[in-house]
C-alpha cells in the first residue's frame, strides 16, 4: 500500500492528461480559410499573397497553419482579403490587404501578421466585407473603418477611414453584417438597418439610392440575424423565417428565380430556420433540426450537392442532421475571383468539413483538388496534452523557438525524453544518460510541441515552438 501511494503521488507531479479538441469557429475569405480551436489557437490556410493568413509570410498553405501560437483567440472574421480577430482579453487584431484601411491600424500598409487595432479591450462582435470592416463593442456601440466610397461605413461621408470610427453613438446594436460595399445591422429594438452601395437593391429600401448613414428598412421589429453577400442580403426573423433581397443573377436569393428583389422577401413557407449565412454569390441556412440547406451559384461545387448546378431554392445538403456552423466564402477578389468554397462544422467539430474550389489550397486538405461534396477531413483533431508546466529553471531548452534543433540541458542526467505534437500524437521517445541532449524536429511541421523530461525521480514538462 505504501508503494502504491508513492506511485500515485509521483504521477500527479507530471500533471499530464488528454482532452478532446474541437473547433469553435470557422470563417472563409475569398481564397482562404480560418478556424479557432477549443485550445484558443487560431489556424489559417489557402492563398496568402496579401498576408491574409497572418503567418508572417505570403506563402500559400495547403493545410491548417498556426497563427501566433502564444495568443488566446476567441473570434475570427474574414473579409475578401483581410481578417479581424478578438483575443480573450478583448483586444482587436487585424491583418491582410490594407489598401483601403480595412485593417484599421491607422495606415494603408499591408500586414502579414496580426497587428493590434487601437488599445481598447472591449470588442465583442466583428464583420469583415470586401474592403471594409464593422465591429460592436461590449456596450453595443457600432464602429466602422476601411473602404467608404459607396458609404458602407455609415458615417455620413464617402471618405475611407483608417481607424475605427463611431457610427450613431447614441444607438445600440445587436447584429451586424458587411457585404461587398454595403452594410446591415439590427438595433436593440430589432429594427433592420442598411447603408452603402445600393446599385442592385441590396439595401432593401425599394430604391437604388446609395445611403451613407444607417437607414431603417421597413418598420418590422422582429429581425434577429443578418448576413450579407457581395451584392445581396439575407436575414432571419424571430419566427424563424428567412428573407433575402438584392442582386439575384446567380439565384443567390433562393426565391426560385434569378430576378432581383427590391425589398426583403420571405423565402418559402418554412419557419424552422436556426441561422443563415450568405457567401459571395450563394447562401446556406441551418434548420432547427441541424440539417443543412443551400442555394445559389454552384459552379465550383461550393454547395456540396455533388454537382456544379445552380440551385434556385433551398435544397438540403446530404442527409446529415448534425450541422452546427456554416461559413460560405465571402467577398469579391479584386481580380474578379469570387469566394467559391465553403466550410462547415458538425456537432462533434473534431474536423472542418469543406467543399468547393481548392486551386489555392483553400479547403486545407493538403491538395489543390476541387470537390463538390463535403469532405470532413480537414484539420482532423484527436487529443491535446494538457500539462501543468513545471518549467523549472534548472532545465534549459534552447533555442526556443527553433527552426529544427533543440538543445536540452539538465542538472541531473536525462533518463527519458518524450515529445508529443499538438494533437497528442507521440513524436519521439528516447532513453538517455546524459546532462545534455540534442533533439532534431527537422522532419516535423511547424507548431507547438510538448516535451516530457525525466531526470532521476522527477519529471519536467515544457512547451517548445518549432518555426
Image: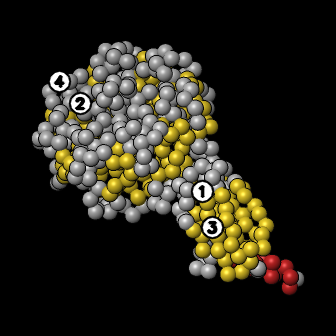
Q: Earlier in the sequence, mark 3 or mark 4?
A: 4
Q: Secondary structure at mark 4?
A: loop
Q: Are marks 3 and 2 in contact (CB under 8 Å)?
A: no
Foreground pick, 313 / 19: 19
Q: Is residue 47 left or right of residue 163?
A: right
Q: Are marks 1 and 4 in contact (CB under 8 Å)?
A: no
Q: Which mark is residue 404?
A: 1
From the top left corner, tell me how far across and down residue 228 is, in percent: 33, 34
- The span from disc 3 to disc 4 (Cα, nearest Å) is 66 Å
Q: Earlier in the sequence, mark 4 or mark 2?
A: 2
Q: Which residue is mark 2?
A: 203
From the top left corner, tell me how far across and down residue 280 is, in percent: 37, 29
Asked if residue 55 is positioned above or below residue 18 in the image, the reply reads above
Q: Secondary structure at mark 1?
A: loop
Q: Which residue is mark 4?
A: 208
Q: Which residue is mark 3?
A: 407
Foreground pick, 45 / 318: 45
From the top left corner, tell me how far across and down residue 407 is, in percent: 63, 67
Q: Nearer the viewer, mark 3 or mark 2?
A: 3
Q: Are marks 2 and 1 in contact (CB under 8 Å)?
A: no
How crowded pointer 2 is (Cα within 10 Å; few <14, some 14-19, many 20+) is rated as many
Amino acid at each position: 500500500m505504501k508503494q502504491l501511494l508513492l506511485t500515485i503521488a509521483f504521477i500527479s507531479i507530471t500533471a499530464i492528461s488528454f482532452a478532446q479538441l474541437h473547433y469553435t469557429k470557422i470563417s472563409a475569405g475569398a481564397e482562404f480559410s480560418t478556424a479557432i480551436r477549443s485550445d484558443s489557437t487560431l489556424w489559417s490556410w489557402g492563398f496568402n499573397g496579401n498576408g491574409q493568413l497572418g503567418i508572417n509570410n505570403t506563402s500559400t498553405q495547403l493545410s491548417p497553419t498556426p497563427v501566433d501560437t502564444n495568443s488566446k483567440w476567441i473570434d475570427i472574421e474574414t473579409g475578401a482579403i483581410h481578417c479581424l480577430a478578438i483575443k480573450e482579453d478583448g483586444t482587436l487584431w487585424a491583418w491582410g490587404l490594407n489598401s483601403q484601411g480595412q485593417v484599421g491600424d491607422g495606415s494603408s500598409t499591408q500586414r502579414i501578421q496580426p497587428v493590434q487595432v487601437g488599445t481598447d479591450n472591449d470588442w465583442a462582435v466583428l464583420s469583415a466585407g470586401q474592403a471594409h470592416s464593422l465591429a460592436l463593442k461590449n456596450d453595443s456601440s457600432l464602429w466602422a473603418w476601411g473602404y467608404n466610397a459607396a458609404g458602407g461605413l455609415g458615417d455620413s461621408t464617402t471618405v475611407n477611414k483608417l481607424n475605427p470610427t463611431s457610427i450613431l453613438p447614441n444607438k445600440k446594436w445587436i447584429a451586424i453584417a458587411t457585404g461587398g460595399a454595403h452594410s446591415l445591422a439590427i438595433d436593440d429594438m430589432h429594427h433592420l438597418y442598411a447603408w452603402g452601395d445600393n446599385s442592385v437593391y441590396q439595401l432593401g429600401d425599394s430604391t437604388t439610392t446609395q445611403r451613407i448613414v444607417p437607414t431603417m428598412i421597413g418598420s418590422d421589429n422582429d429581425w434577429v440575424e443578418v448576413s450579407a453577400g457581395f451584392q445581396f442580403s439575407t436575414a432571419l426573423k424571430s419566427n424563424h423565417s428567412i428573407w433575402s433581397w438584392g442582386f439575384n443573377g446567380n439565384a443567390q436569393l433562393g426565391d426560385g428565380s434569378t430576378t432581383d428583389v427590391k425589398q426583403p422577401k420571405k423565402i418559402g413557407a418554412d419557419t424552422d430556420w436556426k441561422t443563415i449565412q450568405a457567401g459571395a454569390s450563394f447562401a446556406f441556412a441551418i434548420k432547427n433540426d441541424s440539417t443543412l440547406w443551400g442555394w445559389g451559384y454552384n459552379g465550383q461545387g461550393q454547395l456540396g450537392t455533388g454537382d456544379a448546378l445552380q440551385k434556385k431554392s433551398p435544397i438540403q445538403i446530404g442527409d446529415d442532421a448534425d450541422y452546427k456552423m456554416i461559413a460560405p466564402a465571402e467577398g469579391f477578389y479584386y481580380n474578379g475571383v469570387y469566394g467559391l468554397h465553403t466550410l462547415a462544422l458538425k456537432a462533434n467539430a473534431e474536423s472542418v468539413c469543406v467543399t468547393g474550389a481548392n486551386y489555392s489550397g483553400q479547403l486545407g486538405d493538403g491538395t489543390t483538388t476541387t470537390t463538390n461534396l463535403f469532405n470532413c477531413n480537414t484539420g482532423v483533431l484527436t487529443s491535446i496534452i494538457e500539462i501543468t508546466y513545471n518549467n523549472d529553471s534548472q532545465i534549459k531548452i534552447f533555442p526556443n523557438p527553433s527552426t529544427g534543433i533543440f538543445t536540452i540541458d539538465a542538472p541531473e542526467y536525462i533518463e527519458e525524453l518524450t515529445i508529443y505534437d499538438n494533437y497528442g500524437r507521440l513524436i519521439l521517445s528516447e532513453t538517455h544518460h546524459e546532462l545534455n541532449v540534442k533533439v532534431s524536429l527537422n522532419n516535423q511541421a511547424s507548431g507547438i510541441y510538448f516535451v516530457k523530461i525525466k531526470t532521476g525521480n522527477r519529471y519536467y514538462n515544457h512547451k517548445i515552438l518549432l518555426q
